[in-house]
Amino acid sequence: VDETVVEDMRRLEESFKGISQKYRLINRIGEGTFSTVYKAEQLTPPADLDQENDDPMEESEAEMPAAKRRRTRRKAQIVALKKIYVTSSPHRIMNELELLHELRHSPYICPLLTAFRHLDQVVAVLPYFRHLDFRLYYRDFLINDMRHYFRCLLHGLRHVHQAGILHRDIKPTNFLYDNARRSGVLVDFGLAERQGTDWQPCLCQESGHRRRERFMNSYAVQLLQSTQDLQSQSYPKNDSRPSRRANRAGTRGFRAPEVLFKCTSQTTKIDIWSAGVILLTLLARRFPFFNSADDVDAMIEMASIFGRKKMQGVAGMHGQVFETNIETVGERGFSFEKIILWASCRERTSDTLRRGEEQAVEFLHGLLELDPHKRWSAKEALHHPFFTEPVE
Ligand code: ADP
Ligand code: MG
């Protein structure tokens, strides 16, 4: 273990009263914007947050067969300690712990064992989940591996979404996957929120006809129609339109189109889009697949794939206007099949996808659907032949 990591772990043990009596820190395993995560050995059993004790996992050690006892004991011993930075607001920390606690009953979500607070510091304790870094395996994943990966991920999302919660930050580092065991768990509910938080009606909620009517009457469209040359157009000086505020939380490259277009009535479907980005990454074997610096760049990246026409359609759906004079953005974009063939250097016209890949691409269409109303829910996705009638 690195010197600076040892020093960092020592500081935590010293500053956080009681931690060193309960856990022996082993290593630092994650460092992000809002937290540092350590691997640790548990010295005493943690206090149970769950008072009801209705969990079948809770059977007493004496009742278990010896093999299971060994397994359970080993599982309970190694934990992940997530030290949440004091710069994170108390409300935010509370939100993460509360949602994790609420979601603890799914095997596809890493459960919160307990949490400690010392002054302004908070440490969440989760069972340690063995996994590999995505960068180490995304190039070698077979279609069948993707099937198992997505089955776990979508089961996790189904549970989160059924509870009316948006994860908001679905990406490889927040889904811990162990290919050897073919199992995975969702982590990091730091940006999660209940559906409906800050909800405002968005144009996308209205029927097609009403939407078109409202859109054509919108200020933005009138502005566009009143000028011949878009390029010479400047921003209006006295813009009386209220500025649009929408939750943009998430990670660049994984944001759904409705997040980019500042939709004010975002739903759990934003997580399905992000899952789709992971699938496209695996199929194209390119990571990160999208690599934009900001939301405008992200729209351009999206437009180069889906084409200008479809992007304008989605923009309009959320009451926005999308225009670009960038030449690489074509009118119609490219099919996923083309993109995957290019990415894997199979660009001769005679090259086609293998049957398993074809099925995965057909599945991908339901996830990377620009219109959140047409995009599948986790439950719908799990019923796809990709899982029920797998083709190799
Ligand atoms: P952050 O909010 O800083 O992104 P995360 O909860 O995503 O925090 O954790 C950061 C990293 O720590 C994860 O990507 C993962 O590598 C590791 N990690 C988190 N929880 C666990 C766990 N229960 N078991 C093993 N590793 C974990
Ligand atoms: Mg994370």
Image: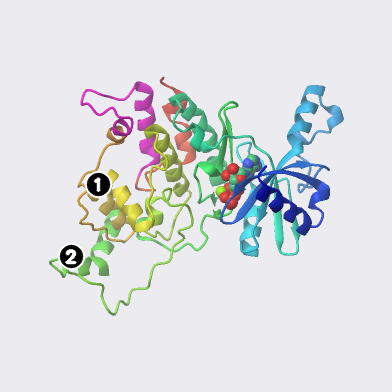
Q: Residue at x 49, y 44 (%)?
A: 171
The magenta span reads: 340-369
The answer to whether the residue bearing label 1 lies less than 8 angstroms from the nearest atom of ligand 2 is no
Q: Residue at x 39, y 29 (%)?
A: 360
Task: Return the residue at label 1.
Answer: 307
Q: Quadrant of residue 324?
A: bottom left
Mark 2 residue type:
Leu
Compared with 120, 49 (above or below) is above
Left or right side of 318 for 52: right
Task: Return the residue at label 2.
Answer: 230
Compared with 217, 288 (above or below) is above
In this rendering, does residue 188 appear at all?
no
Quadrant of the rendered image holding ligand 1: top right
Q: Residue furthest top?
A: 392
Where residue 237 sits: x, y (%)?
27, 79
- Residue 106 lies in the magenta-colored region: no
